[in-house]
Amino acid sequence: MTLQEIIDDSKKIVFFGGAGVSTESGIPDFRSEDGLYRMKYAVPPEVMLGCDYFFSHPDDFYRFYRDKMLPLWAKPNAAHLKLAELERAGKLLAVVTQNIDGLHQSAGSHRVYELHGSVHRNTCLKCGKKYDAAFIARSEGVPHCTCGGMIKPDVVLYGEPLDGETVEGALAAISEADTLIVAGTSLTVYPAAGFVHAFKGKHLVLINRDPTPLDCMCELVLRGKVGEVLSGIIV
């Protein structure tokens, strides 16, 4: 079956996406040849994005975070817009994303499970007051609350667990789906990559530039950019 035929045959689609969904918005991914983890830094990015590093070197963390993790200029691309259109049409049950950029919501999607959190939510570790991403971007050094407490982005750093309520909702949506579209992810980051195994539906589709461990299990595998592939769907 073609992707269009699968979409036409589906009533409860869940989209599971990774960093490759946002590359067409100008945001680099992590593990590809030109990804963030291939760039040369004195301290590897995966170390700087760790929970221990955040608390032991907050100045260095925020210097890197503002430079590489806060692309507030980015706009939704064709993938985000098509998924929002599918949701409005009653075809898409939910988006499960490993991304923290908030572009699905900017495009108009409402049921979005952000497994790794969001740069748009930031919390004072002392009093719990919330701050938006713009506050973090325009602050200097380590951002502090009006109470004096240090502010932490509501993103899941290495060494931190995923949010239990988000995990529960994402797994419930995937298990309820009749079609699961997996896109823009290497499927190597756990526990998120393991979520696809909750799918018990009819059609499993993968859209990715490079091969993944899931390819052999899919009904349809499409190589290419996620936005270019999804933009061809007629809702």
Image (tube, rainbow, N blue to C red):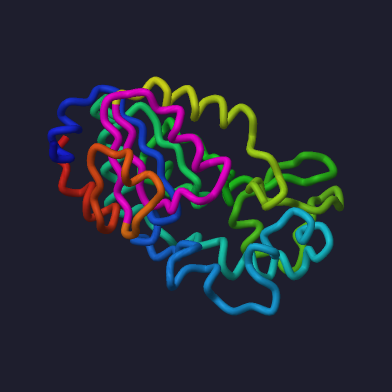
x 52%, y 25%: residue? 169
**Which quadrant, please, contains the N terminus?**
top left
Question: What residue is at 81 percent from the left and 53 percent from the top?
Answer: 150
Q: Nearer the viewer, residue 22 or 220?
A: 220
Residue 166 found in image quarter: top right
Q: Quadrant of residue 53?
A: bottom right
In the rendered image, residue 230, in percent from the top left (x then y), is placed at 23, 47
**Relative image position of residue 88 (x, y in whole percent):** 28, 30
Which residue is farthest front?
216
Q: Quadrant of the C terminus?
A: top left
Question: Horizontal and vertical percent for residue 54?
Answer: 76, 59
Front one among 211 and 134: 211
- Magenta part of the chain: 179-208
Q: Does 109 sit left or right of 55 as displayed?
A: left
Q: Where's residue 158, x and y in %?
A: 68, 52
Residue 186 among magenta residues: yes
The answer to which image quadrant residue 10 occupies is top left
Q: Is residue 52 above or below residue 202?
A: below
Q: Is 216 one of the magenta-colored residues?
A: no
Q: In this view, does 171 lie above or below 142?
A: above
Q: Nearer the viewer, residue 202 or 70?
A: 202
